[in-house]
Image: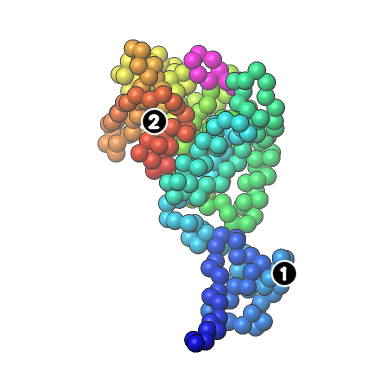
Amino acid sequence: MLAAAAVPPLPPLPRSCASWGRWIPSTPFSSRDGPGWRRGTSGGAVHPAMARPPILSVALPSDTGRVLSIQSHTVQGYVGNKSAVFPLQLLGFDVDPINSVQFSNHTGYPKFRGQVLNGNQLWDLIEGLEENELLHYTHLLTGYIGSVSFLNTVLQVVDKLRSVNPDLIYVCDPVLGDEGKLYVPQDLVSVYQEKVVPVASMLTPNQFEVELLTGLRITSEQDGLKACNTLHSAGPRKVIITSALIEDKLLLIGSYKRTEPCSTSMYTGNTRGGGMGFSLAVDETAVEA
C-alpha cells in the first residue's frame, strides 16, 4: 500500500480585505509564530504588512476598473443600482454602490416607503472611504437624485475623486422625468445645466430630459444630433439619448465628440428602454468613455 505523504498547506491567497484575521505568511515558509505577527480581531494572526487594506492594483479582480455608483435602490423592481451593478460586474468592473434612496418599490406605484440619503450622510461615507485610502475610482456613475443639496454634494464627490484620479470618467444619467412629467423638483434642472453637465464625461438622458437640458425640441434625428452637439459644447464627450419617440418609432441616439473641433458622430437604433441600465449595454460605451 502507498503511504500518503504529509504536504504542508499552501498559504491563502490575499484578496481584497478577505484575508484579514487569517494566517498570512510573508513568504510561503514563514512561521506563524515568528516576529512581526500579531493577533487579528477574529482570532487569526495578521502580519503588519497586511494591517491595512491592499492597494488598488491588488484589490481589483481585473484591470477593467473600479466604479462608484450613486443611484437609487428598490426592494422590488429594477432601477438605479439594482439595474446597473450586476451588468457592470459581468463586464468585469469592481462596483461599489451607494444607494441615494432605498424604497420598497419605485415611485410609479400608488404608495411607497423607505429612506432617503441626505448630503451629509453621503459625504460621511466618502470620508470613511478616504480615511482608509479607498477613494481611487476609475469611474463614477450617478442616477436619480431628489434634492439640490444632495446633487451639490455629488459635485463635491466628483471634485474629491478627481483630486485622487484626474482621469476619472463621470457617467451621469440626469434623471429628471419622462413623457412631459418631472420626477424631481424644478430647481434641479438649472443645477444640472450649469454645474453637472460641464463636469460629466458622458450623459444618458431620455428625450424629455435632453429637451429640458438644451431647451431644444426633438422631432427628428437631426434635432437629436443638434441637441447632442449642444451638450458636447458644454462638456460631455459622449451623449446617449436613451429613448426618443420620433415618427412613431422609439429610437436611441448616440453621439461622441471626436478629437477634431466640432466633429460629431451619431448612431441610432430601436430601443424599448432607457436610462443607465440600457446605456451600460451599448458596446460598453457608458464606462469606456
Labels 2 and 1: the sequence-earlier one: 1
Q: How is the image coloured?
A: rainbow
Instruction: Identify residue for label 1.
Output: 43
Point out the stretch of residues depicted in magenta: 177-185
Secondary structure of residue under mark 2:
strand
Q: CA distance from mark 2 to mark 1?
A: 51 Å
**Camera-side residue of 198 and 88:** 88
The amino acid pointed to by label 1 is Gly
Asked which secondary structure carries label 1, the reply is loop
Mark 2 vs mark 1: in front: 1
Residue pictured at 57% horizontal, 30% vertical: 77
**Is 247 part of what is drawn in magenta?**
no
Front-most of 90 and 8? Answer: 8
Tell me the quarter of the image containing the C terminus.
Answer: top left
Q: Residue at x 38, y 40 (%)?
A: 284
Residue 255 at x, y = what percent? 34, 30
Rendered position, 251 above or below 138: above
Query: Picture quarter containing residue 248?
Result: top left
Judge from the rendering whether residue 284 lies leftward or rightward of residue 113; answer left or right: left
Extreme residue toward the front, this view: 1
Residue under pointer 2: 239
Can the viewer see residue 16?
yes
Q: Is residue 184 magenta?
A: yes
The crowd level at tag 1 (other Cα within 10 Å; few <14, some 14-19, many 20+) is few
Residue 138 position in % (x across, y down): 47, 48
